[in-house]
Image: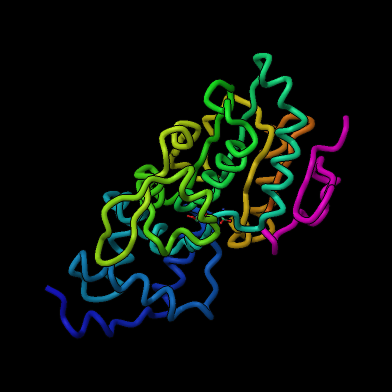
Amino acid sequence: MITAAQNEVTLDPESFRSIADLAYRESGLTLVEEKTSMIQSRLRHRLRVLELEDFTAYCAVLNSDAGQSERRHLVSALTTNVSHFFREAHHFEQLAKLFSSHAAKLRSGGRMRIWSAGCSNGQEPLSAAITLAELAPDIANLDLKILATDIDQNVIRFARTARYSQRFMRGVTTEMRSQYFGALAEMNGEKQYEVTAIIRQMIQFNALNLLGQWPIRTKFDVIFCRNVVIYFDAKTQERLWPRFLEVLHPDGLLFLGHSERIAEPEKFGFECIGPTTYRPLPK
Ligand SMILES: C[S@@+](CC[C@H](N)C(=O)[O-])C[C@H]1O[C@@H](n2cnc3c(N)ncnc32)[C@H](O)[C@@H]1O
């Protein structure tokens, strides 16, 4: 039962530290004290679900041996999943250029691999798939695959449904909507759309923590990791760059978000070749 008292539970400094330490260890998220009230309001819901009286009891659950599934809920509650179709459009223009330079190779049996690392609700990998489909009506015959991953299992579940209500469709033109989405019945007065099979089939959605193991046995032509590392501290970011380098083709591209950058790209084997766009340094 939800009580008025649970709505007013405050996040005490000790619990904040414990939650911040856990979030950092589990996902690399850096929580700052200035965000206490936002964190408190995002987590009150978990207290209600678990029928806990305060954050001390919540931390005890999180830190217990049986707390694994709650730790997943914690990360899901703390991550910011804001995204939209064709966000930071210049990266999709670069993807289109790269595709055009690979098209002949692709049409004679070559392959292209793209990774959307931190894909949130799926708009980013779908934008990549639509960009490519716009260029290649024969896309279904090409060996072209997009891996889309996120730590938050809720967004992966959502993305796999491939269904978007009107409010998630920002960035999709009317023409694209009619070509790559089918209209579904309205829900609660809001229009609903489903991505067509040809686009869906290009994307594999998986839960993956960027700080954990990457069960990846391929090299990518393009990696999108945008608006993800902004939540990480410098140390965590610097652990990621060499790992991205290792799974990128020598002529591949790494795209970061508009307020992210590799501070000293050469130190990590990259060169910056455009706004938030990196390529492995020639060997
Ligand atoms: C703001 S969204 C960015 C979505 C998309 N890349 C874009 O730019 O629109 C950030 C995403 O990063 C994910 N994320 C945060 N920490 C992560 C981690 N350690 N491993 C994988 N994904 C993570 C979050 O769950 C969230 O969905």
Quadrant for the C terminus in the image = top right
Q: Position of residue 246 (x, y in %)?
A: 70, 32
Which segment did they paint magenta? 257-283
Please name whichever residue, 234 or 125, is drawn nearer the observer in this view of the structure.
125
Q: Residue furthest left?
A: 1
**Vertical order, 155 against 128 (above or below):** below
Q: Residue at x 50, y 32 (%)?
A: 202
Quarter of the image for residue 263 reads bottom right
The foreground one among 238 and 152 is 152
| Image side of residue 47 versus residue 244, left or right | left
| Coordinates of residue 27 in the picture (x, y in percent) | 50, 53
Rendering quarter of residue 230? bottom right
Residue 9 relative to residue 139: left or right? left
Q: Quadrant of the N terminus?
A: bottom left
Q: Is residue 231 something that shows in the picture?
A: yes
Q: Residue at x 40, y 52 (%)?
A: 155
Colour treatment of the image: rainbow
Check the image and report above or below for 195 versus 248: below
Is residue 277 magenta-colored? yes
Residue 211 appearing in the image:
no
Q: Position of residue 193 (x, y in %)?
A: 37, 51
